[in-house]
């Protein structure tokens, strides 16, 4: 035996000791252990885990009867309703791939996705019949269309031959379904909301979804039986994997067709919501909700937010209202969030403004992400942890996509050098916490100096009159580029361009302060991301005598809304 | 492309999106994110995560300098002290396999293990020098010996050339270490405390340890920064994976060289312990602790217990003392616990005696165990979920061992049919909860009827005079076998054999009541398991006029102790 590794003899994988990781295991267990607990609440509808599981099995069975299986794509077009949740399990139970469509997209984009994904079946909420009808007319190989008839939907006609309920009725509730043969098998497809060109189809596998779902539990130290409010769209990185996370913890999914302050405050009070995820805009809604819809939450609510760091004022108001905010960061390519601003107890005693500085950092890797670094984009050499040297953010781990569907070139580029290239720029603090500075294409280079648009925006957000802000480069003969700020004011607020510039100069190196300020509503993608490329185009067209309105005359939020 | 699965094209694993799962990732992250938090407390010693991590890296470096690496075994012989914890990371960082030796074993058993595992290096606490010295004299290929000099150890001499601290000093704190190349790589070796024959060496891989460590978090819904008291030995199924679990949650390991009531109560009050695991005997210590050592725990303490279901009286006393008890079940072959008596809120309102009935069940699979069934041992067909039909308990999942080292035959038998055969017998309740009835070799067959020794023991434990009980088969001419009870009485308690028998007949079908009762201390394995084979041998020798002492004359616990 000498020289031979005894641990490699007769100790192989077999059916007893190796099972592919898959989030499907979560629903099977929860339905078995807690059949009578509430799985889902939607308006006046409540379903138990037993019922929900049965519906998922029926869905998988009905799909299989239609010949849908391994390698096939099924696309739901629906808001946060029980059917969308069921699709997160039932489609994979049939071995197929879930492509949750973004309900805010137009027919062109939907048609592209249906065609690119070769979707065999489309499950669509009636409210979206107009856009879906148009999209279908543009697709060559038409998928089977199933209509969801949600009683809370507003209008819309039926497009398919069957309703979702009729389709489920065809399925066998006792149909056997199987775990994927390989944990690398595709589970979901999510198109990036590319700001230019065709969107790319990000492929998630079962292993990654299982691990990121658990990563959410570890990051939030979630309790048993969380009551989770669905404000984050399930079509957005599969609701950052929370359909699987909440199910793993035998929680309750509280659906919201549309995110409104009243809908949220009612859910807090009536259903005892404990957790939710939301973009900064959702926090704004909570803070600025009219008095008549505010109700006291049954308990403190944990809020996970991504995309932009919450300013101090927002943080403080949220805390006072009973919300604890956790700041995470991620991308579609990594199953949603994979870093967290892991909090240190000792920061609790800092003034709220300093807390906000810490909280604004994107932080450290999830337990389930093995590699995270800020490095030189060309050499992949980590930059110094000095809080100043800009580098690109790179990731490595099991919650990184398999790649882009039918796009080997983009996949190769994304993984060059054995790391996932996020395209985001940031710094590495001495504590090891990363802080996002910009998308590489968003950075402003003024007189040879880098200006982080995020840094300028964070100062703008501290101004009491500012509701939303976006900063982009404006071409400048002398400096190359200068910062141009687009600002949406709060309702009733008024401020001059000069006041904004002065405010920034107080809080920033002067070269970083905007030279130009434009007031008005900001263009957003369908997932609520600021469309900076539109702002950049606009900034290019601003004449040197640029002010879009005579100085001193500003729109209130109310007026801006009307104009929008 | 027709007929080809587009999800299998150019979407392969690579360094960016696939990383072997390993618990080593936990300590790297925790040391990076929370370098100054307390990792370990041992007497007056405290070390941070930064310090602990550095010591683990030094250990791995020193091992590599000695040529220890892939496929090599390193065996620590030590109680729950920081060095044992460090071995749970540092040995694997060198690519080697940890074989934590049971400190209660004798020289013969230790010598067998050192030889069978081909241990290259032995790290031994000085207190165990006598038994280790003897064991080493029996081993042909002697390992390098490193002595741990724990200031809290009682006596013992040095056996090796180096102390553990000297060894660490040889290591480079900046030594690069690598994740295992394959998550299937062996991480740990744990010998079963076989009651007959040579122990079998159970091999754990990195994937399973990672997943069971996380399974503990999910099962207990653990918070960030748990303060974990080490009463469960780390050499027992690697402390059921809690060295890795607690580290993943950036908690604090509170060491205890020896488990004493004072040591535990001091830790609760002084260190704010939040979690601990312990056999029923540990709960007994807490309940029966003398007044002078009792101190109020800083907060409620979560206690995970295995091996035997806690009786109602114990449960109630524990709850009143501030302990919440979770009942789990597992075996060495499955990394410790893999089932949990998952609690239902509605059970809280039941009388404590009924709560104890539910709590006594071994329950349902951990989230991280994919398969659990009670089935016919020959056909592997599941038995009905009627709470009555006896079957063998089978498991399947990623937290099942790779197999037995150098024992292909035993491995094959354990995995026959693609399930792990536990050798434990149980029933399946209509709720899907399993309840252990017996080891298959322990079951008593009397007049053709099965008698579960666990069932009889659970009745005996309800008798107020009984401290510990063990029931085995006694050969009987008429019935084949009859139940024979061995009982250790509580201090100061007195009861007659007939009273015990009558009590059992009140609570059991009459044929299940013991025909024979023997009073005295019970033989245990070094891990505290009842040695039923010894009781069986003793039962065989009991004459028909069996009473070991004249009727009416019983030993108090105190007297029993003296005789022991």
Image: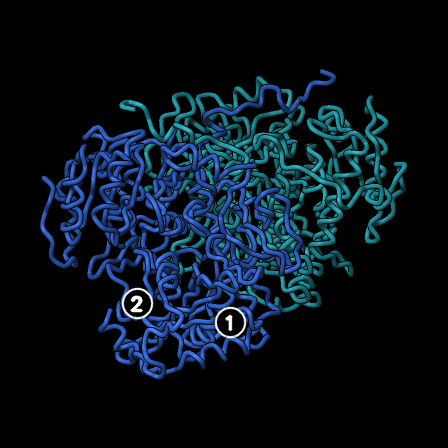
Chain colours: A blue, B cyan
Q: How many marks?
A: 2
Q: Quadrant of residue A269?
A: bottom left
The N terminus of chain B lies in which quarter of the figure?
top left
Q: Chain of mark 1?
A: A
Mark 2 highlights which residue? A264
Mark 1 element type: loop
Foreground pick, B323 / A223: A223
Q: Is residue A563 left or right of residue A350?
A: left
Foreground pick, A386 / B150: A386
**How far from the left and from the top, in percent, is residue B134?**
85, 31
Foreground pick, A177 / B193: A177
Above or below A363: residue B528: above
Q: Chain of mark 2?
A: A
The numbered mark at residue B543 is none
Q: Residue furthest top?
A: A1
**How far from the left and from the top, in percent, is residue B501?**
50, 43
Q: Quadrant of residue B186?
A: top right
The crowd level at tag 1 (other Cα within 10 Å; few <14, some 14-19, many 20+) is many
Q: Residue furthest front?
A: A477
Mark 1 vs mark 2: which is more N-terminal? 2
The answer to whether residue B36 shows anywhere in this view is yes
Foreground pick, B302 / A490: A490
Q: Quadrant of residue A495?
A: bottom left
Looking at the rendered image, the disc whose residue lies closer to the viewer, 1 or 2, is: 1
**How far from the left and from the top, in percent, is residue B274?**
58, 60
The answer to whether dots 1 and 2 both sit on one chain is yes
Residue at image location 53% in from the left, 56% down from the top: B314
**How far from the left and from the top, in percent, is residue B554?**
65, 48
Mark 1 highlights which residue? A513
Residue at image location 37% in from the left, 72% down from the top: A546
Q: Are marks 1 and 2 in contact (CB under 8 Å)?
A: no
């Amino acid at each position: 035996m000498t020289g031979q590794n005894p641990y490699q003899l007769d100790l192989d994988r077999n059916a007893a000791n190796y099972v592919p990781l898959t989030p499907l295991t979560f629903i099977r267990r929860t339905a078995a252990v807690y059949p009578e607990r509430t799985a889902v609440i939607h308006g006046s509808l409540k379903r138990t885990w037993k019922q929900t599981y049965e519906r998922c099995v029926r869905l998988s069975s009905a799909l299989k009867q239609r010949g849908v299986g391994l390698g096939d794509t099924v696309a739901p077009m629906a808001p946060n309703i029980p059917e969308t949740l069921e699709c997160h399990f039932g489609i994979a139970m049939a071995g197929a791939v879930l492509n949750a469509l973004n309900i805010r997209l137009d027919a062109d984009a939907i048609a592209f996705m249906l065609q690119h994904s070769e979707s065999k079946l489309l499950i669509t909420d009636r409210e979206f019949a107009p856009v879906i009808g148009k999209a279908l007319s543009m697709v060559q190989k038409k998928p089977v269309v199933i209509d969801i008839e949600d009683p809370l939907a507003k209008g819309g006609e039926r497009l398919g031959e069957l309703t979702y309920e009729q389709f489920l009725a065809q399925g066998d509730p006792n149909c056997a379904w199987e775990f994927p043969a390989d944990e690398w098998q595709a589970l979901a497809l999510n198109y990036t909301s590319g700001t230019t060109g065709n969107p790319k189809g990000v492929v998630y596998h079962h292993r990654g979804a299982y691990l990121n779902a658990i990563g959410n539990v570890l990051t939030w130290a979630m309790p048993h039986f969380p009551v989770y409010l669905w404000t984050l769209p399930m079509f957005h990185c599969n609701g950052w994997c929370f359909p699987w996370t909440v199910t793993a913890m035998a929680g309750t999914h509280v659906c919201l067709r549309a995110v409104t302050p009243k809908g949220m405050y009612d859910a807090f009070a009536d259903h005892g919501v404990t957790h939710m995820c939301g973009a900064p805009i959702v926090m704004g809604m909570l803070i600025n909700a009219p008095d008549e819809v505010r109700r006291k939450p049954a308990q403190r609510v944990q809020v996970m937010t991504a995309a932009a760091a919450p300013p101090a004022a927002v943080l403080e108001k949220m805390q006072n209202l009973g919300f604890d905010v956790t700041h995470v960061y991620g991308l579609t390519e990594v199953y949603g969030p994979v870093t967290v601003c892991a909090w240190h107890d000792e920061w609790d005693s800092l003034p709220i403004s300093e807390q906000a500085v810490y909280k604004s950092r994107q932080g450290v890797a999830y337990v389930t992400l093995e590699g995270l670094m800020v490095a030189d984009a060309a050499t992949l050499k980590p930059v110094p942890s000095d809080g100043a040297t800009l580098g690109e953010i790179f990731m490595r781990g099991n919650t990184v996509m398999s790649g882009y569907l039918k796009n080997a070139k983009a996949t190769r580029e994304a993984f060059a050098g054995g790391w996932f290239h996020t395209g985001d720029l940031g710094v590495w603090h001495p504590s090891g916490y990363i802080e996002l500075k910009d998308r590489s294409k968003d950075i402003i280079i003024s007189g040879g100096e880098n200006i982080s648009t995020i840094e300028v925006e964070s100062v703008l957000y501290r101004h009491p009159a500012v509701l939303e802000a976006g900063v982009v480069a404006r071409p400048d003969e002398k400096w190359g580029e200068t910062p141009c700020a687009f600002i949406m004011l709060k309702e009733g607020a008024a401020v001059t361009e000069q006041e904004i510039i002065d405010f920034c100069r107080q809080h920033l190196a002067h070269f970083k302060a905007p030279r130009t300020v434009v007031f008005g509503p900001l263009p957003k993608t369908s997932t609520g991301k600021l469309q900076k490329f539109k702002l950049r185009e606009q900034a290019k067209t601003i004449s040197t005598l640029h002010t879009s309105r005579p100085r001193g005359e500003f729109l209130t939020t109310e007026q801006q809304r009307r104009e929008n």
